[in-house]
Image (cartoon, grey):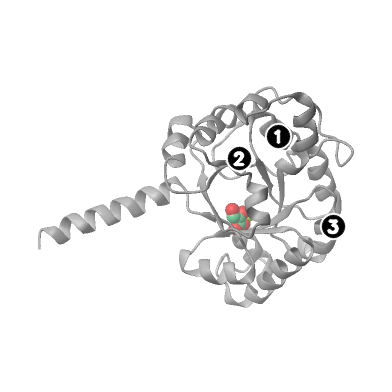
């Protein structure tokens, strides 16, 4: 299986499922669907340390990229999730250069960062062969993704992108819309902010980093890909279930004439 970093460097579009139900059997079902990756959400989803430890297994077994969104400021959890076998970490609310530096430090071994040694589960789960190779390759085989979702983050975007160890950004369009409207609205497809989203993607690619976004409305997918976003998150378990049931009932009713 090719690394997520390799696929993103090649410009491939990568779709990630979004999981909020903290149960490894549910994760197993999600990972069996046609997504390229599964993200376990510890920020707004119900995932916690134990469910991440267990949930990474069915994702890797399905041959998918295991991604974890940590809670705000929980950079210790970024290291832990990597030690559990996650390949990429999404850190929400990276609003300052200090946030970016702390996040990168937790993601990368020296000399880039300060990640502490101890891939207790990840080594075997991700096919580690020997410690020297793991140490040599880990920094480029793990993807540190900083969420951009406030005006403060936008103000220091170039600095975040230039932070050693930060591999890319992930746009949170709901929080970004709240920031954009000064708290007046939550609208992840707000037309007024689309030029800013386009500018963020362009600056990210220019810096040689990866751009991702949560696609709340699938009709916007093509537009975001055209802007340069390649790592795309879709839905959650509730949505997958609702859409599946809607499609199934509609097909059943249609067959009745
Ligand atoms: C946002 O849109 O704010 C997000 O965090 C998406 O997950
Ligand atoms: Mg958000």
Q: Mark 1 — residue?
A: 77
- Mark 2 nearby-residue class (10 Å; few <14, some 14–19, many ≥20): many
**Which of the pair 50/27 is nearer the observer?**
27
Q: Position of residue 76 (x, y in %)?
A: 75, 34
Residue 244, given in percent of the width and then of the height, sits at: 32, 51
Residue that mark 2 sits on: 42
- The numbered mark, 3 or 1, whose residue comes first in the sequence reads 1
Does residue 205 appear left or right of residue 97 in this picture?
left
Residue at the disc numbered 3: 162
Frontmost of labels 3 and 1 is 3
Q: Quadrant of residue 188?
A: bottom right
Q: Is residue 28 left or right of residue 11?
A: left
Mark closest to the chain's N terminus, 2 or 1: 2
Q: In the figure, is residue 72 to the left or right of 38?
A: right
* Residue at x-position 62% and y-position 77%: 192
For disc 3, the neighbor class at 10 Å (few under 14, some 14 to 19, many from 20) is some
Residue contact between numbered discs 2 and 1, judged by CB atoms under 8 Å: yes
């Amino acid at each position: 299986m090719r690394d997520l970093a390799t696929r993103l460097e090649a410009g491939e579009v990568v779709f990630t499922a979004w999981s909020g139900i903290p149960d490894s059997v549910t994760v197993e079902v999600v990972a069996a669907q046609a997504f390229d990756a599964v993200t376990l959400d510890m920020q707004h989803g119900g995932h916690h340390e134990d469910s991440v430890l267990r949930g990474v297994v069915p994702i890797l077994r399905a041959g998918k990229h295991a991604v974890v969104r940590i809670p705000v400021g929980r950079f210790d959890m970024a290291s832990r999730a990597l030690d559990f076998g996650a390949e990429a970490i999404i850190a929400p609310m990276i609003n300052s250069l200090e946030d970016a530096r702390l996040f990168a430090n937790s993601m990368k071994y020296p000399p880039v960062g300060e990640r502490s040694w101890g891939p207790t589960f990840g080594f075997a789960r991700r096919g580690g062969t020997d410690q020297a190779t793991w140490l040599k390759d880990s920094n480029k085989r793990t993807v540190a993704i900083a969420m951009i979702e406030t005006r403060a983050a936008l103000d220091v975007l170039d600095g975040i992108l230039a932070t050693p160890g930060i591999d890319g950004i992930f746009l949170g369009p709901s929080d970004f819309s709240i920031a954009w409207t000064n708290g007046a609205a939550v609208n992840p497809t707000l037309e007024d902010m689309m030029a800013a989203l386009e500018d963020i993607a362009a600056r990210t690619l220019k810096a040689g980093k990866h751009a991702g976004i949560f696609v709340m409305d699938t009709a916007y997918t093509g537009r975001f890909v055209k802007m340069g976003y390649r790592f795309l998150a879709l839905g959650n378990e509730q949505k997958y279930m609702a859409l599946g049931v809607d499609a199934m009932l509609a097909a059943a009713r249609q067959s009745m004439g």
